[in-house]
Amino acid sequence: MDDISVGQIFVSAVLANNFVLAMFLGLCPFLGVSGKLNTAAPMGAATTFVMLVASLCAFGLNWLVVHFQLEFLRLISYIVVIASAVQLVEMVLKKYSPALFRSLGIYLPLITTNCAVLGVALFQTAREYSFIQALTFAAGAGTGFTLALVLMAGLRERLNLAKVPNVVQGTALSLMLAGTLSLAFMGFAGLGAGE
Amino acid sequence: MAIPGQKELTYLEEFMEGIWKQNPVFVMVLGMCPTLAVSVSAVNSLSMGLATAFVLVCSTLLVSLIRKLVPKEVRIATYIVIIATFVTVVDYLIQAISLALYEALGAFIQLIVVNCIILGRAEAHASKNPPFRTVVNALGMGIGFSIGLFALGSVREILGAGKLFGIPLFGPDFQPWVVMVLPPGGFFVLGAWLLLFNWLSSRKGGLERVEPVEGHVHG
């Protein structure tokens, strides 16, 4: 996988293979936290940060696991390390930046069960990215996630003022909206490095 | 152990809970993240559903068996490790049974770990109920989930490729709706199913609409 440039990986992860809109990862926070613009952006930033940490850990772990030929432990070790990393980030934030910690609140620990984070770790392993490539991939995935979240939040804020039939209210409407957004992102399909 | 103030369900009711009243896909809207992506065909989504059901039944059984041994503080971590273990088993199992299927599902099999139905069931049901009751409930949930995924996958395959289980349905003149097998199709089809269920429940008032609070927070 040395032939793919760093820029290509980044653009592909942000636009063409957007984690939320093209790969359906991290849908739950996408539908849950995208109600307001001012919670969507911090959530995106926190997830991006955890993705970078997870990517870093996964790269080291993968090397260890392959070195000792314990491939069957890969998934278990990933999930445990991601969970501990989130815990660690939480503790550091609480100590050094209580304001930020408070504004993120409950969302921070819940990032552990965000499939986009585990997705980053698993995909970078499956595609055999180098260290730099893996970090770029994580940064791109996080940016893409934030972008999708912010776009969706903007749309939903506007939608609150619109008149819709009762039956359509709620998740069904959000999904239709997400589908339309995803359709728009299909336009970027030619940009990426592909699967 | 019954929740106070709530009637103990019979085993049949417990089983039907997941299939109809609290269907994970249509009513609770849980665990879509790794599964929408593979629901492009009936075969893919059915095997993903069965794999998830297997992990669900095995891990909730184990959680229920050890529910009195696990300290409260580390229970989520314990559940996650148990789930990850069974997902690894399924991962290798699918690889052994059908390599083509394994390649089609890819990393999404491993993503069953963060499927919120499993953790949700382990936390909400298995940690409070005896093993047999848990297995009955998990079986219902697993089957309900598979049915939901199958409904999603078959619609996408019929419209997007004009086939079901790879068998052409409409003859050579059919123009496939390519968008249905692309990512937007997944959102649209799930949205349409939810609409249908909303409409049915608003007409009959029979189906209890549970607001998917859990689904909004878990991955």
Image (tube, coloured by chain):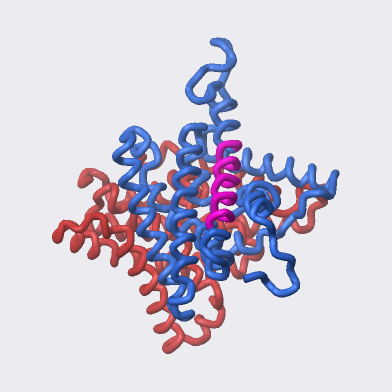
Chain colours: A red, B blue
Q: Is residue A169 left or right of residue B106?
A: right
Residue B140 placement, left or right of B62: right
Report the magenta stretch's main SS. Answer: helix
Q: Give the camera-side residue of B162 and A7.
A: B162
Above or below, B12 against A53 in this view is: above
* x 39%, y 47%: residue: A12
Q: Is residue A178 above or below residue B117?
A: above
Out of A177 and A11, give the one closest to the viewer: A177
- Asked whether residue A103 is drawn in magenta, I would say no
| Residue appearing at x 44%, y 63% in the figure | B62
- Work out whether residue A47 can be spotted: no
Tell me the magenta residue range: B135-151
Percent position of residue B53, x then y: 49, 48
> Measured from the top left, where is residue B76 in percent x and y?
46, 71
- At 33% from the left edge and 34% from the top edge, which residue is drawn? B98
Residue A172: % across, % down: 69, 48
